[in-house]
Amino acid sequence: MDEVVKSLKKIINESNKIVAFTGAGFSAESGISTFRGAGGLWSKYDPNIYANINVFLQDSTYYWNFFKDERYPVIKKAKPNPGHYALVKLEKSGKLYRVITQNIDGLHQEAGQTGVIELHGSTRKINCLSCGKVYSMDEAYKLLEKELPPKCSCGGNLKPGTILFGEPLPQDAVDMAKIASKNCDLFIVLGSSLVVFPAASMPRIAKKNGAKLVIINIDPTPFDEIADIVINGSTSKILSEVI
Ligand code: NAD
Ligand code: ZN
């Protein structure tokens, strides 16, 4: 086993309150494209049009077309990968304190993870802006096939449960994530470019409060220099080797 992977195993063994912080790279091997980097989704769909709250409120058909052609078919087909199952195993061992995710795909929960903090909401819940009724992805897709933009049975407009650009993050999720980051003894970043704030402030909070910081990501991140261990590689391969 690689030396750096051995030291990761040692750090995990010595820790009892681990936070796993996952980003788009963690789900890449489940077949969901990341936003940034080569082949990233944003090179195909401009986020300032397809995922911006102000555009959405003026004309939601951009978003719903993106949902219909890209988001729904991709997430519907995606299955948790070995990285998701490794974290479930870590939770069962009693060492994993929290999973904080920037992902909106719901794959942690599908793998059987509990206590997931979703910073950017979930694509699996679609809400009516008038009556508050919640629809599943499948139900929203069916409504979408009938009319664009889709409407609730009350006639109200629907909005995805994901946080669009220009929207604030859900305060309860941010608060829970900050508390978890403050109280953990090991913070592991998994497949995140760590450039989206306030999500990316969490590793610093953890480090400041005495936790060890591990970053596993294919590309370098702005936080590599304060990390105890940096591994540039696939999260699913490394986690299944270590856990
Ligand atoms: P990002 O797209 O900015 O960065 C992903 C990082 O993952 C890159 O630095 C890349 O090097 C790395 N990576 C790619 N494949 C990897 C692998 N197999 N193993 C390890 N690393 C890998 O992602 P981010 O930092 O999560 O950006 C945040 C935004 O992306 C959030 O708004 C989030 O909601 C959104 N997003 C979510 C999904 C999803 O739910 N699956 C998919 C795309 C984007
Ligand atoms: Zn309604």
Image (tube, rainbow, N blue to C red):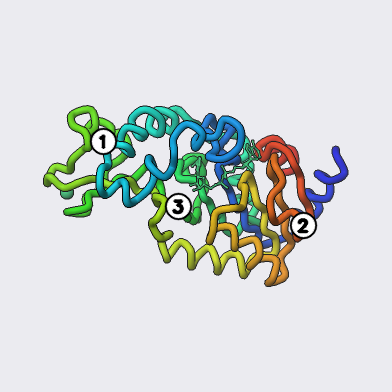
Q: Mark 2 highlights which residue?
A: 225
Q: Mark 3 highlights which residue?
A: 120
Which residue lies at the image location 70% right of the left edge and 60% below the top edge?
186
Disc 2/disc 1 C-alpha distance (Å): 45 Å
Q: Secondary structure at mark 1?
A: helix
The relative height of residue 206 versus residue 227 in the rendered view (above or below) is below
The reply to whether discs 2 and 1 touch (Cβ–Cβ < 8 Å) is no
Q: Secondary structure at mark 2?
A: helix
Is disc 1 surrounded by few (<14), some (14 to 19) or many (20+) residues within 10 Å?
few
Q: Looking at the figure, which quarter contains the C terminus?
A: top right
Which is more toward the observer, 169 or 18?
Answer: 169
Which is more toward the observer, 115 or 26?
Answer: 26
Instruction: Please give the label number shown on residue 139.
Output: 1
Is disc 3 surrounded by few (<14), some (14 to 19) or many (20+) residues within 10 Å?
many
Q: Amino acid at mark 3?
A: His
Which is more toward the observer, 110 or 153?
Answer: 153
Which residue lies at the image location 26% right of the left edge and 49% below the top edge?
57
